[in-house]
Amino acid sequence: RKEVEQDPGPFNVPEGATVAFNCTYSNSASQSFFWYRQDCRKEPKLLMSVYSSGNEDGRFTAQLNRASQYISLLIRDSKLSDSATYLCVVNMVNSGAGSYQLTFGKGTKLSVIP
Amino acid sequence: DGGITQSPKYLFRKEGQNVTLSCEQNLNHDAMYWYRQDPGQGLRLIYYSQIVNDFQKGDIAEGYSVSREKKESFPLTVTSAQKNPTAFYLCASSPPRQGIYEQFFGPGTRLTVL
């Protein structure tokens, strides 16, 4: 099983649509979870952390299901500017490098169409 | 402005040459990281450093070397032993907050071997 797995997409959605991304992770001891956004040929940027109780930031909602080892990101009212690749990122606690190491999914590409 | 800088933005190297990529941060972060990203792939950890004068190999350290003589600086050398060095190289740092390990990235260096 891959450590962090995401649907690669691409997801092509019209402006105003709601889109959901899913991510599964393999290490049940993981403690920290994040969604990053990466624009084409740019560096990843932190979009939001994911907490057990779920959290919302404007049009973005992140959920964590520890029992199923599953993370989601919901984007409501999609904008053209949301077009990017969304990376699911997990802190792999028992990795050989220790708990400072993050493992990145390959990302899900989103294209919002006018 | 606080942030992470990487230079150069683009770098071309002939086969058999060593090259050093610069990474500087003024965020007072203790931990710093080097990743490489290949097209359509996730980020892979090359080296990381949790404190000055200490660093650890990541998943793909072969053919690379680093130093951490100052808290602000974490240069990466790509040696001639690295068989496929053409990639997008990203440097990151993280703040020393207990239990939270989000990382912040520099703008990256694109290395092309001719």
Image (tube, rainbow, N blue to C red):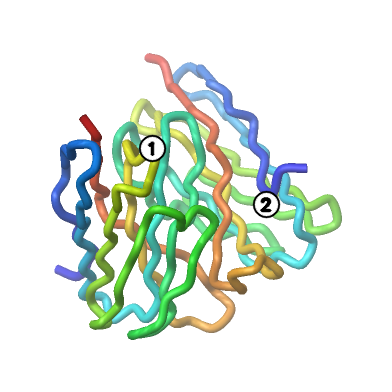
Q: Is residue A104 left or right of residue B67?
A: right
**Residue B95 visible, this angle:** no
- Could you tell whether B89 is left or right of B60 in the image? left
Q: Is residue A25 above or below residue B24?
A: above
Name the kind of residue labelled 1 in the image.
Answer: Asn
| Residue B11 x %, y % | 16, 42
Q: Are marks 1 and 2 in contact (CB under 8 Å)?
A: no
Specify the label residue B84 is tagged with.
Answer: 1
Above or below residue A12? Residue B33 is below
Chain letter for mark 1, please: B
What residue sits 48% from the left and 65% below the top? B102
Q: Nearer the viewer, residue B100 or B14?
A: B14
Identify the amino acid type marked 2.
Gln
Residue that appears at 40% across and 47% down: B36
Circle 1 or circle 2, nearest the eye: 1
Task: Tell me the element at label 1.
Answer: loop
- Quadrant of res B28: bottom left
- Along the line of sight, the residue nearer the viewer: A19 or B106: B106
Residue position marked by numbered label 2 in the rendering: A63
Callout 2 secondary element: strand
The dot on residue A79 is none
